[in-house]
């Protein structure tokens, strides 16, 4: 196109289902050219449309107040009320949330990480920085913006300048714009009048300049664009100033001055500004001069949202119809347009220079040549620098400047050229490299670094090589920018940044060869190689490592071998430790190799690896043997699996760590553990005793306590079993263990332990232990006392001790051990007839500790309660208040009859239940006293009932006044209830003066539902009582009447008339409630409550006549009003109104009106209107009265009276009257009312009812309401007035919610053509929506099939395509369905329809285009079968289209399987050779195999060779087997070649032998490199007499054939001459190797001699040799020490577990970890002490030794038991 502007619709929101009401400024947000967010409020949906996929929206069920997508990332800003959320739309993860305390008006992204929040009073910034930061207030809103609608909030790139823009209406109907410009640095605001604004950053002579542009339109209609510079005070002094620019904005005159700016957008690519107006016009301005460049209308409606388009430098906008429009500059014609239309060459030149627009190159070239030829070098350089798109900045220009001669002392012309370019921007590749060579040659390489940091140079690999010479780090930066990946990696390794290599490769998508790079790094640094290998291992297979363990193992094996081949064992081990973390079974072989290598060369590292327990799949037997040889017994035990091996190694307890060994036994089976433990016991009983006890104690449960007890008991060491039992008794629950320990302790006279166990243990058998202790009679009685005390054997213990004369132990037990057992002991002593005096003394000795209650019970059982009297009185005398003491002494007084009643009534400490129980059989009266005192209700009832004490019970009931107690007595289940009640009525209640107790009794009778008894009681109190208080008591009278109402209604009237002091109102209401209407009426009459009385007659008796008579008798206004109310509610409107008139009531008009609405007939309204006119002037709500009067006239059809009433002053609600008469279908009255009201909508409905259709249409037109249009439309349809119906229908169908009802109405009545006429006419309307286009299309598929395709092609973009597709399928319109599937981008379905309905829907070109875009493989394969069956001639074209997507295996299977019976096993594959030729470059095995089969079938040998050599990805062995049997020799030779290529040398040789192709055979033998194959071939040639072949074979296999074997065969078969060339060459090679070895040995010998000479000189000069001797290598300052390595130090001494003692010099450098060092002198002192102790024991006598050992064993056992107890505690 020759237009300077390109316009394109890139999407349609209506086409993807966005309703029209969702296309508003508040619901659609677009912050970038990537995503549009639409809030569909009707469906509670958030629609996100990716503009790269304009037909595939993303929908989320989400209700928000705002949704804005980040312009640079998939982060969604959601506003819900005052809550803001940042939400990742791809991962569905909430990133951040905050609640703003003010109401949020507007929010938007002002940068990629900052959100602008505008509230009613202020502006805030909220950072998306990964933290939980809160919004930060930036500034307060200007007061002039308080009423404005905020439309945009923008910031410059540095966010130092902010602009808030809003619009508002004015009094003259125009739209006024207001802006607030804010400086963050100065914290100042400026108010401006303007509708739209933006910021634009440009470069002026190399200085960054921030421009602020805004467009405004004032009240007079003058509109201008202003461009000013902001922040100029921060620029350098010599920087150019921009100044202020402005230009007029032109609007087309046909718009009538109503247009104004709605958006101003700065181009992201050019120095241009785009302004969009309300009318859809686009203005383009030059940002530097504010000049207008272009204007045109781009949309028929307003583009209400817009943003910049980054790649094109244009803009994107959405208009009211839902069209997404993209407008951008047409670069090719933009400059010519300006020069031809605007005639401004300077402007065109500047724009071309600034933006790189083509079209002005010739102008710049002419100017450049003119200046250059004139010698104006500086000016020429400026022109070249500003040339559009760098047209003059090439190598030719550089050479021209270089060719200019330079005077001495002056800068060269080329340098001036480069300086000019640098001032204006960056250099290109050629310029950067040329400048680099220039400054490096001048020794100013540091300038390059400065320019690179400032991005002034274009990075290239050559530039990086140049910079790297002086600064490798800066060189690396250049390589990275230039994307020179190989140089980047090499430089990273050289600079020690190996950890960044893998990350860099992943970032740039580079595939690395791990071994090559690691080998490269190993030549630089072993550590770098290791680090790089680890990083690459983790990066190449970062996830699911266990799933591909074979690949990891293979790569790790290769890397390990590479490190080992270079002698880097440490690095190889470290690499494997990192690579084999997962410990998969596939790593077993490599784990074994690593451990084996380290055990043989560096056992400390192997020890460290095994200690970490990270590998478990190595060869355990092999590693265990190596560990045992190296003295690593711990690891040997861990890996040995044979029990004999374990038993052999485990005896090294002097080296093994006891703690580890203790845990090791836990890994053994119980039987193996016992055997190993037995081995330790047998090997060194005394030395291993402590260890064995520890092991046995820990694993007693697994090994079995009985077995272990037998093993330790069988030992000859006396205290072995005792030590073992002492170690486990505290933790064992085996009764046998506890008994054995008690038994063993007693035998060894360890009575303290026996006492402790009997006291603390809960697991021994007390009977068995008691029997054992009584049988053995130990000296210490404490164990027996503990058992008997704990398990209740006190009686037996006391009898046993008294029998054995140990009475003192009994007294001591009671007095010192457990005084609480005194009652039991006293009982036993009484049973044994011990003297009472001794017993009393024993009791008195523990009187303060003995449990008195138990003691009293024991003595009471034996009838000796009096025995305790002195003891109890002593306790009382001491001031005791214990309940048991006083209860017991009460028993004593009762037993002795010592004034018991006085004690029971005065004492407050005894237990009433206990004493009462004691008295029940002895003295029941005392029991009542005790129970009453303690309020023991149940016990008192029981004793009084049992002893017929009903009077006492009645008195107690009344005094107690307890509802619960009354409930127990007043129950029919109580046989004594009547007797107790009689006593209450006769004696208890009359004697009471407290009303509360009377009330409690009455309440109890009521609760018990005993009305007869209650009435009897109340009659006695009210009528027969001498107490006047009870007789006149209102409550009792009320209660009496209420009780009779409930239980004896016949007696109620008597009490009502006799009594006069009761609550009349309440009693009357209860009577009415109980249907005792006459009683209630009587009460109201007696107390002169006439209104309530007539209420009973009206509401309850429902005798209207009696009520009227009663009203006439009383003739009271309030009575008439009550009667009138009832009459009106009953529907007697006339009678009720008359009653109101008699009552002269002027306030009940509301009741009259409501009754009239419900019940009045037209004739009744005469009376109603008369009454309402009477009270009209006195009514508070005159509106209600007038409304009802007017309605009455209408109801009586007195329309003249109604109209007359309306003309008079009135307050009637005419709308209400109109609605009422319309509801009652009084159409003429309704017509009058709606005409007067001018309610055309409802008037139209009324006119329709009256059949006046034309008038109804006119009324609907005036009303212009959807409901009115719809009603008139439907009525016209029913009357077949289709012309009028269409006029109405067009007003209805534009409303999406009403369309379906119109469709159904027309279709149900069969008016299809008329309906289509309506919709066809409606499509041209401005408000036509998607549903109209869609439903019209559906109608075309039903009733106009021949025009359906034309309709679909014309309107599919504005229709709901899926619905149209369903309609086409239902109507069998397959071509139309296929077309719709295609345009809707459902290519799979489109292809399926074409295939299934080929004759109607298939088209070759259309199908090829569709299938190329299809995504389903099944559809693609189905299309292949379809073409085979229907269009075989086009099959190759289809296959070429499907090749990039379809799976080759399945395609070849389909082709081979088609027509197999007709064409053979290849099927129709040969027909597809053309396809195979085009796609074989992919080198897929299936394609190669198919092509080879076709070529073989055709006999094309050359083609087959090319195919097999070029494309080797196929099953070559299988194909070679097929070729081997071919009838032609050359094909068999090709099979030999394939066999040889795949290492199948035997088969290749066999085929060559069979064909006599000796050269091929020799080549196969030489390629194999296998000595056996070579020897067999030699034998074959010799035996076959092929001597020349023998010579040729030796020549071919020179490197691998053994010389001795060649000489042997030559000599044996007289073929030395034929072997001589081989032998000569061999001797030459051997001689060269020997000479080389001799030189190496000579050099090594010289180096060794030199080293020895240096060591001798060092020793001769070292004076410390005189003190420490020779051999310590200069470490004379360190003492000789024993070191322990490769194991942990045991806590008990220098013999560390798993450590091998070595005598050497402390602080050795070869150990892995710092060794533990022990001074040799201290060690020798310890050994000497142990020797002296052994000699001293040897001279002891046998008895002394036994005594000594016994004491030592006891001390050891006691100390060990103490340690064990403390450890477990």
Image: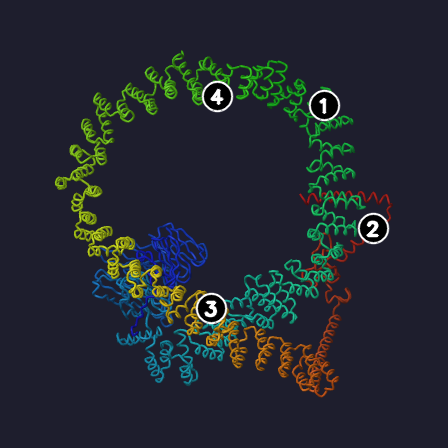
Element under disc 3:
loop
- Which residue matches tag 3? 1446
Q: Nearer the viewer, mark 2 or mark 4?
A: 4
Q: Nearer the viewer, mark 1 or mark 3?
A: 3
Disc 4/disc 1 C-alpha distance (Å): 51 Å
Q: Nearer the viewer, mark 2 or mark 1?
A: 1
Estimate how packed mark 1 is, as few (under 14), some (14 to 19) or many (20 or more) residues with alpha carbons within 10 Å: some
- Which residue matches tag 1? 829
- Which residue matches tag 4? 971
Q: Is residue 115 visible?
A: yes
Q: Name above or below for residue 1088 compared with residue 413.
A: above
Element under disc 1:
helix
Element under disc 2:
helix
Estimate how packed mark 3 is, as few (under 14), some (14 to 19) or many (20 or more) residues with alpha carbons within 10 Å: some
Element under disc 4:
loop
Residue 869 lies, in percent from the top left, at: 65, 18
- Which residue matches tag 2? 1734
Q: Which mark is residue 473?
A: none
Disc 2/disc 4 C-alpha distance (Å): 97 Å
Residue 576 lies, in percent from the top left, at: 62, 64
């Amino acid at each position: 196109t020759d237009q300077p502007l390109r316009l394109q619709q890139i999407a349609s929101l209506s086409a993807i289902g966005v309703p029209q009401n969702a296309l508003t400024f508040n619901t659609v947000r677009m912050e970038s050219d990537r995503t549009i967010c639409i809030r569909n409020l009707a469906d509670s949906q958030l629609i996100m449309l990716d503009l790269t996929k304009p037909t595939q929206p993303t929908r989320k069920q989400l209700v928000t107040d705002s949704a804005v997508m980040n312009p640079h990332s998939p982060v969604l800003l959601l506003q819900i009320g005052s809550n803001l959320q940042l939400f990742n739309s791809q991962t569905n993860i909430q990133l951040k949330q905050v609640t703003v305390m003010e109401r949020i008006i507007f929010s938007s992204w002002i940068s990629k990480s900052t959100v602008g929040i505008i509230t009613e009073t202020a502006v805030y910034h909220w950072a998306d920085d990964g933290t939980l930061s809160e919004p930060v207030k930036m500034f307060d809103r200007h007061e002039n913006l308080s009423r404005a609608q905020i439309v945009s909030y923008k910031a410059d790139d540095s966010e130092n300048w902010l602009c808030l823009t809003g619009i508002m209406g004015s009094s003259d109907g125009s739209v006024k714009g207001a802006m607030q410009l804010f400086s963050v640095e100065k914290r100042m605001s400026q108010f401006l009048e303007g509708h739209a604004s933006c910021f634009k950053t440009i470069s002026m002579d190399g200085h960054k300049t921030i421009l602020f542009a805004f467009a405004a339109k004032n009240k007079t209609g003058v509109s201008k664009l202003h461009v000013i510079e902001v922040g100029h005070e921060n620029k350098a002094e010599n920087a150019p100033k921009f100044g202020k620019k402005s230009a007029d904005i032109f609007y087309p005159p046909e718009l009538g001055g109503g247009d104004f700016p709605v958006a101003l957008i700065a181009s992201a690519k050019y120095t241009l500004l785009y302004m969009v107006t309300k009318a859809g016009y686009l203005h383009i301005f030059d940002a530097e001069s504010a000049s207008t460049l272009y204007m045109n209308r781009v949309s028929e409606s307003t583009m209400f949202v817009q943003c910049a388009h980054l790649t094109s430098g244009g803009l994107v906008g959405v208009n009211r119809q839902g069209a997404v429009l993209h407008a951008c500059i047409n670069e090719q014609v933009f400059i010519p347009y300006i020069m031809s239309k605007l005639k401004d060459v300077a402007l065109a030149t500047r724009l071309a220079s600034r933006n790189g627009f083509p079209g002005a190159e010739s102008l710049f070239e002419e100017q450049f040549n003119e200046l250059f030829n004139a010698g104006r070098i500086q000016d020429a350089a400026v022109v070249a620098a500003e040339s559009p798109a760098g047209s003059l900045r090439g190598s030719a220009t550089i050479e021209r400047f270089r060719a200019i001669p330079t005077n001495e002392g002056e800068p060269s012309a080329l340098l001036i050229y480069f300086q000019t370019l640098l001032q204006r921007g960056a250099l290109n590749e050629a310029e950067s490299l040329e400048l680099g060579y220039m400054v490096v040659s001048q020794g100013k390489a540091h300038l390059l670094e400065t320019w690179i940091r400032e991005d002034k140079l274009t990075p290239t690999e050559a530039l990086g090589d140049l910079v790297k010479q002086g600064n490798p780090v800066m060189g690396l930066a250049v390589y990275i920018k230039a994307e020179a990946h190989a140089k980047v990696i090499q430089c990273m390794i050289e600079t020690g940044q190996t950890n960044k290599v893998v990350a860099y490769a992943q970032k740039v998508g580079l595939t690395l060869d791990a071994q090559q790079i690691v080998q490269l790094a190993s030549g630089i640094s072993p550590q770098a190689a290791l680090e790089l290998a680890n990083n690459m291992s983790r990066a190449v297979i970062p996830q699911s490592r266990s799933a591909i363990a074979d690949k990891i193992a293979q790569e790790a094996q290769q890397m390990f071998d590479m490190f080992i081949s270079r002698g880097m064992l440490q690095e190889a081990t470290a690499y494997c430790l990192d690579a084999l973390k997962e410990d998969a079974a596939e790593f077993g072989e490599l784990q074994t190799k690593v451990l084996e290598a380290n055990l043989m060369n560096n056992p400390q590292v192997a020890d460290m690896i095994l200690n970490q327990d990270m590998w478990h799949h190595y060869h355990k037997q092999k590693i265990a043997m190596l560990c045992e040889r190296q003295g690593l017994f711990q690891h040997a035990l861990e890996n040995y699996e044979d029990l004999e091996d374990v038993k052999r190694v485990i005896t090294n307890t002097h080296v093994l760590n006891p703690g580890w060994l203790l845990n090791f036994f836990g890994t053994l089976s119980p039987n193996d553990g016992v055997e190993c433990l037995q081995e330790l016991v047998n090997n060194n009983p005394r030395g291993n005793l402590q260890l064995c006890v520890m092991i046995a104690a820990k694993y007693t449960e697994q090994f079995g306590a009985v077995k272990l007890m037998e093993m330790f008991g069988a030992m000859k060491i006396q205290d072995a079993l005792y030590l073992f039992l002492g170690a486990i008794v505290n933790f064992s629950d085996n009764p046998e263990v506890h008994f054995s320990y008690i038994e063993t302790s007693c035998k060894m006279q360890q009575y303290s332990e026996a006492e402790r166990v009997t006291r603390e243990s809960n697991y021994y058998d007390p009977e068995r232990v008691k029997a054992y202790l009584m049988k053995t009679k130990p000296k210490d009685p404490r164990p027996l006392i503990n058992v008997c005390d704990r398990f209740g054997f006190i009686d037996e213990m006391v009898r046993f001790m008294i029998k054995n004369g140990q009475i003192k132990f009994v007294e001591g037990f009671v007095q010192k051990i457990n005084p609480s057992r005194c009652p039991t002991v006293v009982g036993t002593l009484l049973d044994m007839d011990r003297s009472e005096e001794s017993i009393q003394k024993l009791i008195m000795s523990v009187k303060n500790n003995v449990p008195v209650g138990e003691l009293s019970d024991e003595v009471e059982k034996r009838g000796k309660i009096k025995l305790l009297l002195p003891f109890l009185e002593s306790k009382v005398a001491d001031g005791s208040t214990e309940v048991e003491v006083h209860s017991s002494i009460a028993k004593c007084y009762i037993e002795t009859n010592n004034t018991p009643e006085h004690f029971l009534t005065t004492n407050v400490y005894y237990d009433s239940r206990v004493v009462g129980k004691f008295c029940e059989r002895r003295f029941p009266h005392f029991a009542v006293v005790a129970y009453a005192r303690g309020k023991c209700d149940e016990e008192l009832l029981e004793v009084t009932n049992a002893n017929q004490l009903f009077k006492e019970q009645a008195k107690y009931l009344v005094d107690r006044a307890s509802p619960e107690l009354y409930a127990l007595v007043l129950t029919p289940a109580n046989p004594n209830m009547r007797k107790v009640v009689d006593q209450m009525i006769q004696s208890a209640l009359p004697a009471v003066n407290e009303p509360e107790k009377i009330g409690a009794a009455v309440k109890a009778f009521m609760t018990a539902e005993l009305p007869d008894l209650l009435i009897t009681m109340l009659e006695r109190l009210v009528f027969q009582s001498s107490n006047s208080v009870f007789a006149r008591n209102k409550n009792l009278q009320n209660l009496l009447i209420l009780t009779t109402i409930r239980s004896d209604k016949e007696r109620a009237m008597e009490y009502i008339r006799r009594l006069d002091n009761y609550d009349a109102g309440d009693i009357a209401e209860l009577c009415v409630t109980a249907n005792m209407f006459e009683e209630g009426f009587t009460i109201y009459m007696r107390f002169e409550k006439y209104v309530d009385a007539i209420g009973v007659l009206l509401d309850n008796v429902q005798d209207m006549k009696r009520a009227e008579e009663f009203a006439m008798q009383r003739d009271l206004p309030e009575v008439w009003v009550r009667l009138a109310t009832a009459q009106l509610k009953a529907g007697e409107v006339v009678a009720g109104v008359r009653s109101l008139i008699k009552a002269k009531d002027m306030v009940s008009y509301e009741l009259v009106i409501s009754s009239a609405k419900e019940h009045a007939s037209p004739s009744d309204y005469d009376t109603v209107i008369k009454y309402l006119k009477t009270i009209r002037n006195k009514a508070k709500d005159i509106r209600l009265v007038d409304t009802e009067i007017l309605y009455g006239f209408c109801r009586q059809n007195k329309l003249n009276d109604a109209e007359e009433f309306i003309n008079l002053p009135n307050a009637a609600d005419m709308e209400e009257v109109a609605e009422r008469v319309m509801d009652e279908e009084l159409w003429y009255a309704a017509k009058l009312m709606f005409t007067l009201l001018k309610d055309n909508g409802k008037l139209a409905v009324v006119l329709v009812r009256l059949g006046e259709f034309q008038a109804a249409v006119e009324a609907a037109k005036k009303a212009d309401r959807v409901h009115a249009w719809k009603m008139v439309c439907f009525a016209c349809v029913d009357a077949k007035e289709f012309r009028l119906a269409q006029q109405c229908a067009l007003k209805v169908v534009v409303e999406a919610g009403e369309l379906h009802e119109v469709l159904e109405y027309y279709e149900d009545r069969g008016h299809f053509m008329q309906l289509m006429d309506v919709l066809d006419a409606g499509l041209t309307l401005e408000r036509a929506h998607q549903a109209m286009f869609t439903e019209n299309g559906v109608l075309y598929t039903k009733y106009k099939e021949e025009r359906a395709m034309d309709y679909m092609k014309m309107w599919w973009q504005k229709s709901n395509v899926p619905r149209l597709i369903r309609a086409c399928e239902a109507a069998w319109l397959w071509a139309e369905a296929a077309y719709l599937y295609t345009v809707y981008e459902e290519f799979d379905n489109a292809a399926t329809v074409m295939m299934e309905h080929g004759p109607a829907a298939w088209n070759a070109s259309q199908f090829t285009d569709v299938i190329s875009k299809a995504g389903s493989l099944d559809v693609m394969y189905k299309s292949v079968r379809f073409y085979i069956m229907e269009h075989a001639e086009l099959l190759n074209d289809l296959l070429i289209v499907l090749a990039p997507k379809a799976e080759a295996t399945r395609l070849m299977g389909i082709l081979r399987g088609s027509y197999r019976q007709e064409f053979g096993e290849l099927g129709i594959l040969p027909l597809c050779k053309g396809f195979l030729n085009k796609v074989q470059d992919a080198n897929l095995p299936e394609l190669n195999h198919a092509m080879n089969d076709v070529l073989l079938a055709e006999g094309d040998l050359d083609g087959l060779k090319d195919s097999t050599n070029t494309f080797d990805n196929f099953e070559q062995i299988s194909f070679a087997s097929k070729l081997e049997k071919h009838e032609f020799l050359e094909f068999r030779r090709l099979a030999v070649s394939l066999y040889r290529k795949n290492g199948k040398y035997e088969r290749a040789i066999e085929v060559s032998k069979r064909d006599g192709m000796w050269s091929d055979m020799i080549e196969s033998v030489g390629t194999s490199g296998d000595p056996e194959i070579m020897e067999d071939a030699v034998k074959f040639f010799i035996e076959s007499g092929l001597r020349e072949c023998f010579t040729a074979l030796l020549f071919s296999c020179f490197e691998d054939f053994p010389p001795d074997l060649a000489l042997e065969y030559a000599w044996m078969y007289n073929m030395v001459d034929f072997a001589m060339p081989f032998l000569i060459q061999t001797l030459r090679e051997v001689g060269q190797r020997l000479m080389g070895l001799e030189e190496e040995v000579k050099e090594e010998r010289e180096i060794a001699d030199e080293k020895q000479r240096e060591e001798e000189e060092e020793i001769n000069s070292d004076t410390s040799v005189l003190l420490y001797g020779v051999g310590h290598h200069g470490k004379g300052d360190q003492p000789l020490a024993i070191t322990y390595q490769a194991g942990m130090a045991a806590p008990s001494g220098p013999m560390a577990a798993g450590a091998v003692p070595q005598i050497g010099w402390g602080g050795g450098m070869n150990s892995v970890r710092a060794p533990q060092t022990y001074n040799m002198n201290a060690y020798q002192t310890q050994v000497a002490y142990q020797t002296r102790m052994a000699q001293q024991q040897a001279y002891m006598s046998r008895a002394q030794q036994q005594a000594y050992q016994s004491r030592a064993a006891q001390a050891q056992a006691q100390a060990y038991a103490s340690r064990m107890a403390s450890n477990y505690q």
